[in-house]
Image (tube, rainbow, N blue to C red):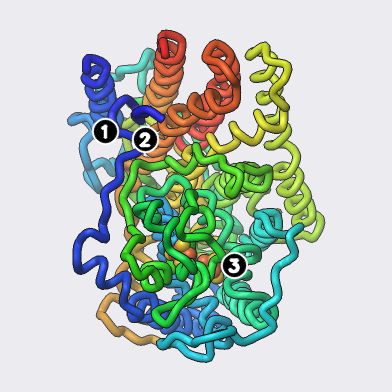
């Protein structure tokens, strides 16, 4: 491919290799690296769990667990970690540590030979994002409890950790992370946009290297726990950034790169094809953002009552609407526009399914922008509660850092709407920039791609305007 | 090369525009309690209106109950003198107004009041400022000060970008 420049400025093939710095390379190759971060987060999450169990303050905004998980962790995830560094969270996530430990029998050193546990393969038919989609959607049914009730957060985290452990005993490696973890799907989807990646450097070196130690493992590290083939994979979606391949590659052929945002959105290969599962992930994330905004940042009491289940009928109504909206209405609208795209293009051969899936990836930047906007609406007004809970994590009247009585102070909320709107427009720009490229990939010639792009451009503009209305109108 | 310059300039312009739109105009720069006019009748000094309507005095009785404000959306015109009576129907609730950075609170039987001149346009969220129960952080309402120009500027910009993209796509040769 010739040079393709994003906004006519940044070459899509541009990479800046961070691992060319000795220190970064040494860190990536050290067995300490993910481990120390994981242990640190394990410590934090133990406090979170304890606070969930004992911190029994009825209002979530004074509970350590609630604030750390839903204000700090969530906002860091969506504002910085995912858009900047892909699955950086998975690198330091403590949830699967017990299953890793059970499989490997060691925390630090590398176990030689077969891993413990049953090591079964996850069924092929379930090897997609579908389970993640449904798991995440189902999780959001309870968002009116998790985000305000410490004990609900405790149960959610407890289930995740327990299922991760049990899955690890039965299935191989990080099967849980790949196909079950509720926080995995959206990280995978939006990591395609991220400005960082782990990739092999020189394909020629990989070709000559047998056996492929990055896949099978050696004395320095484990074969890719996320079942990637580090020597040729091309998409961030399922790379857990665990850095094992840096340790197992004897030729130092793995790189941690900075790159232009969004390049994975154009990847569509035999090994890593675009799929309806990822398309649906994009729809669901958009739909949930709408519902969450209405419920948590909108002024409508009716919706709040439904979400927090003041009446059973109301709550069932919410679940039903939420599910139908995410699984039928949004995909339905998208389908309509995909159909229009086909009509406009005048091409009768291209299958509608291909048009539908290809274009669904244009929702990735926009969806991420929407979530960043939504998360700004969480952190700016509520961030100051963090000072309180850091000083008094269990609501026992402690004052560790002297900030326990810091009053509630909204930060920059006079700019909130502007910031949300501006974020949205910037990510919209990425969406339309990649959108036309997707159109080129979908239709065989330029005139068709142009015409086929028009309805999609219209749809993306409509969605953006709708969110501007939510944020500012 | 020429394309590159045009794109760079327009991207730069876009960012500046977005940020400028967000900055408060000098006339409406931060006041905190200063804009709390407690005795509105004695001080009918209203700023000259930029909107068509002559400024009026507007009184709202906002009831707070069970994580909801009623009315949940209030609308005024730029320059209006706004008076809010906050009435709690259950527990201690507060009302903090984004953008104007003023607040009051109310207990059952003890109402709170706010008085200010709506000199900044746009939509502003008002939030409960007293922890009142589990859904407290989600207890919000909107104040819309017309004309809501920020919103229209952003929509206009989005549409302009869509048209620019369209033009670019159609004019592109290769
Ligand atoms: S997929 Fe889930 S459990 Fe696995 S590392 Fe990522 S967040 Fe943690
Ligand atoms: S390719 Fe595999 S081994 Fe390498 S960082 Fe990603 S998940 Fe880890
Ligand atoms: Cu309240």
Depth check, front residue: B143 or A252: A252
Tell whether A247 sits left or right of B134: left
- Subunit ID for the residue under disc 1: B
The reply to the same-chain question for discs 3 and 1 is no
Above or below, A163 relative to B138 = below
| Quadrant of the rendered image containing residue B44 | top left
State the mark number for residue A331: none
State the mark number for residue B19: 1
Q: Which residue is mark 3?
A: A146
Q: Is residue B147 visible?
A: no
In the rendered structure, are the residues bearing label 3 and label 1 in contact, judged by CB atoms less than 8 Å apart?
Answer: no
State the mark number for residue A422: 2
Q: Position of residue B85 (x, y in %)?
A: 46, 46
- Rounded to the nearest angstrom, the CA distance separating label 3 from label 1 is 35 Å
Give the mark toward the camera: 2 or 3.
2
Tell whether B159 sits left or right of A328: left
Residue at the (38%, 75%) spot, across then down: A34
- Subunit ID for the residue under disc 2: A
Residue at the (80%, 60%) spot, across then down: A312
Q: Position of residue A266 (x, y in %)?
A: 49, 37
Depth check, front residue: A208 or A310: A208
Q: Residues within 10 Å of mark 3 (few under 14, many from 20)?
A: many
- Rounded to the nearest angstrom, the CA distance separating label 1 from label 2 is 8 Å
């Amino acid at each position: 491919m010739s040079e393709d420049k994003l906004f006519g400025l940044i070459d899509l093939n541009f990479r800046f290799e961070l691992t060319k710095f000795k220190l970064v390379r040494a860190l990536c190759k050290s067995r300490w690296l993910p481990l120390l971060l994981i242990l640190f987060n394990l410590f934090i999450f133990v406090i979170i769990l304890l606070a969930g169990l004992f911190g029994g303050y009825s209002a979530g905004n004074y509970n350590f667990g609630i604030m750390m998980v839903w204000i700090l962790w969530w906002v860091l995830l969506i504002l910085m970690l995912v858009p900047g560094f892909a699955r950086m969270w998975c690198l330091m996530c403590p949830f699967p540590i017990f299953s890793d430990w059970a499989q490997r029998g060691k925390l630090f050193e590398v176990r030689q030979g077969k891993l413990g546990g049953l090591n079964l393969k996850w069924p092929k038919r379930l090897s997609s994002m579908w389970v993640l989609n449904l798991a995440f959607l189902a999780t959001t049914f309870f968002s009116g409890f998790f985000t305000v009730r410490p004990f609900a957060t405790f149960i959610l985290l407890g289930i995740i950790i327990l299922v991760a452990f049990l899955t690890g005993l039965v299935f191989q490696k990080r099967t849980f992370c790949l196909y079950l973890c509720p926080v995995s799907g959206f990280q995978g989807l939006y990591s395609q946009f991220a400005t960082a990646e782990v990739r092999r450097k020189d394909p020629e070196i990989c070709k000559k290297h047998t056996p492929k130690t990055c896949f099978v493992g050696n004395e320095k590290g484990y074969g890719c726990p996320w079942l990637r083939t580090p020597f040729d994979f091309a998409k961030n979606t399922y790379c857990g950034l665990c850095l094992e391949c840096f340790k197992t590659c004897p030729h130092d052929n793995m790189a941690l790169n900075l790159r232009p945002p969004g390049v994975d959105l154009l990847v569509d290969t035999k090994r890593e094809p675009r799929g309806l599962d990822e398309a649906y992930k994009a729809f669901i994330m958009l739909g949930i953002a709408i519902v969450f905004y209405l419920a948590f940042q909108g002024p409508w009491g009716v919706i709040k009552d439904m979400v927090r289940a003041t009446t059973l009928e109301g709550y069932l109504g919410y679940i039903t609407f939420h599910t139908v909206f995410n699984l039928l209405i949004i995909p339905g609208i998208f389908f309509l526009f995909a159909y229009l795209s086909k009509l406009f293009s005048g091409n009768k051969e291209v299958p509608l399914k291909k048009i539908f899936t290809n274009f669904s990836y244009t929702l990735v930047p926009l969806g991420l922008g929407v979530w960043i906007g939504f998360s700004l609406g969480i952190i700016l007004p509520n961030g100051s509660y963090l000072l309180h809970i850091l000083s008094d994590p269990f609501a026992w009247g402690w004052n560790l850092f002297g900030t326990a009585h810091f009053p509630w102070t909204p930060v920059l909320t006079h700019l909130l709407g502007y910031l949300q709107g501006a974020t949205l427009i910037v990510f919209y720009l990425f969406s339309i920039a990649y959108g036309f490229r997707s159109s080129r990939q979908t239709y065989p010639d330029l005139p068709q791609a142009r015409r086929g792009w028009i309805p999609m451009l219209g749809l993306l503009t409509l969605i953006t305007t709708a969110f501007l209305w939510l944020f500012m109108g | 090369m020429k394309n590159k310059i045009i794109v760079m300039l327009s991207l730069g312009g876009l960012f500046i525009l977005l940020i400028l739109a967000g900055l408060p105009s000098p006339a409406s720069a931060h006041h905190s309690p200063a804009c709390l006019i407690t005795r509105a009748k004695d001080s009918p000094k209203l700023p000259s209106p930029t909107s068509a309507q002559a400024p009026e005095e507007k009184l709202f009785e906002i009831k707070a109950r069970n994580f909801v404000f009623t009315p949940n959306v209030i609308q005024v015109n730029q320059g209006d003198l706004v008076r809010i009576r906050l009435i709690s129907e259950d527990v201690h609730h507060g009302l903090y107004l984004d953008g104007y950075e003023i607040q009051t609170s109310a207990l059952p039987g003890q109402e709170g009041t706010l008085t200010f001149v709506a000199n900044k346009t746009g939509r502003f969220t008002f939030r409960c400022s007293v922890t009142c129960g589990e859904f407290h952080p989600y207890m919000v309402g909107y104040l819309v000060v017309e004309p809501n120009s920020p919103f229209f500027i952003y929509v206009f910009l989005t549409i302009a970008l869509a048209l620019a993209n369209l033009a670019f796509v159609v004019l592109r040769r290769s």
